[in-house]
Amino acid sequence: MPQPATALSRYTVLDLTRVRSGPTCVRQFADWGAKVIKIEMPEGLDEGDPMGGPRQGPDFQNLHRNKQSMTLNLKSAEGVAIFQEMVRQADVVVENFRPDVKDRLGIGYESLAEINPRLVYASISGFGQDGPYAGRPGFDQIAQGMGGLMSITGQPGQGPMRVGIPIADLCAGIFAAQGVLVALLEREISGKGQWVQTSLLQAQIFMLDFQAARWLQAGEVPKQAGNNHPTSIPTGVFPTADGYMNIAATGQRIWQRFAMALGHPEWLEDPRYAAAAARSQNRDVLNEEISAVTRGDTSANWVARLNEAGVPCGPINSIDQVFADEQVRHLGIAAYLNGGSNDPVGYVAQPMTLSRTPSSIVSHPPRHGEHTESILAGLGYTPEQIADLRGRQVV
């Protein structure tokens, strides 16, 4: 049985999140040992977790491991009062309601900070907590489009294309977690909490990175380049005898090694390819010449040959091939826990390691409201009081 993580074990996080961006944020704390309490509506009042799939499905399971679950009706005055009691003992609250909802419920940052001035409160929204779009519903693909990503993804001339993961949701969640950690570190100096805010739109624009800088600093509007790298040539997808592979022959020295490894030293003297600017100008012709060579052998043989020559390259794996890869297995990115039938259940583990205080996946997602009684008992409620609250659907 894996040992619980300890790095963040001194922190209590109240999780009001739904769907994906918020749970992605909170998962960072749960995996590093924080006590995370997922607040859910009582049965019969729960409207479900849209886009999260069924509770026992892989999507929900991967997002909500390592948590406790408590049912609490925040639309009732008593439910809000109980939540306020919990806030007095908490370090962090994370929510991804529409901006106006939390204040309407009476659980916005200002009201909770009066109860606990040390509270770090994180909000994830579609477009920000204020401004002309603040009231709009947020959705990952909308942010991908508005944030410019779809305009630079896909093949030229074939229209905009979304990427294969909800990258705006995921990055917003990770950035929110980073913001909370910064606020917790600053609290050690000031003794005060603060409000951490991010949005899908901000996260998506930040992830444009150098593509955004090309516009901001050079006035260039980047376009779709398909599988070709927009600035480093030749970089892209090339056919082989049994499929495709990625090659990234960036920089002059790697280009020289690449031409030699493919058996075409004359490319180094060809004025169309000799310098980076010329290769960029003659990208399509060069890619055709490279493809004619790479079709002559298998992906595995090319990967071995080019890596030996010091040229970055690799296969293009399906998801099952990813987790069968020897390096992926060595890194331990897939973590397994025994399930109810003792069959192992796989989770995507954290992508970074700490030498003394590693993350850990120690428990499956909780049943709906599994820890309600124990949490209320910790607040001083008697079994009779808990039964009364349950009977009135406060919990």
Image (tube, grey):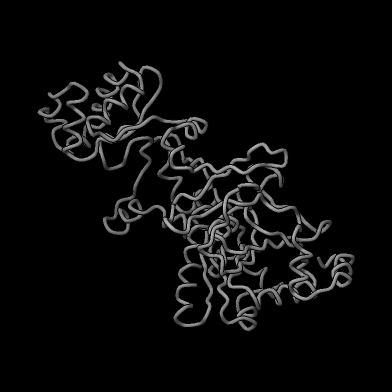
Residue in the picture at 49% in, 35% down: 323
> Would residue 60 be found to the left or right of residue 174 on screen?
right
Quadrant location of residue 242? top left
Query: Residue 347's spot in the image, x, y percent?
Result: 58, 44
Quadrant location of residue 373? bottom right
Query: Residue 222's spot in the image, x, y percent?
Result: 34, 47
- Whether residue 330 is situated above or below residue 240 in the rendered picture: below
Residue in the picture at 26% in, 24% down: 290
In the foreground, 308 or 277: 308
- Whether residue 195 is situated above or below residue 294 in the rendered picture: below
In the foreground, 294 or 117: 117
> Would residue 181 be found to the left or right of residue 263 on screen?
right
Residue in the picture at 47% in, 63% down: 178
Residue in the picture at 37% in, 35% down: 227
Query: Residue 41's spot in the image, x, y percent?
Result: 76, 61
The residue at the far left in this view is: 269
- Position of the C terminus, as image quadrant, is bottom right
Query: Residue 21's spot in the image, x, y percent?
Result: 57, 56
Quadrant location of residue 83? bottom right
The count of marks equals 0
- Whether residue 1 is situated above or below residue 286 in the rendered picture: below
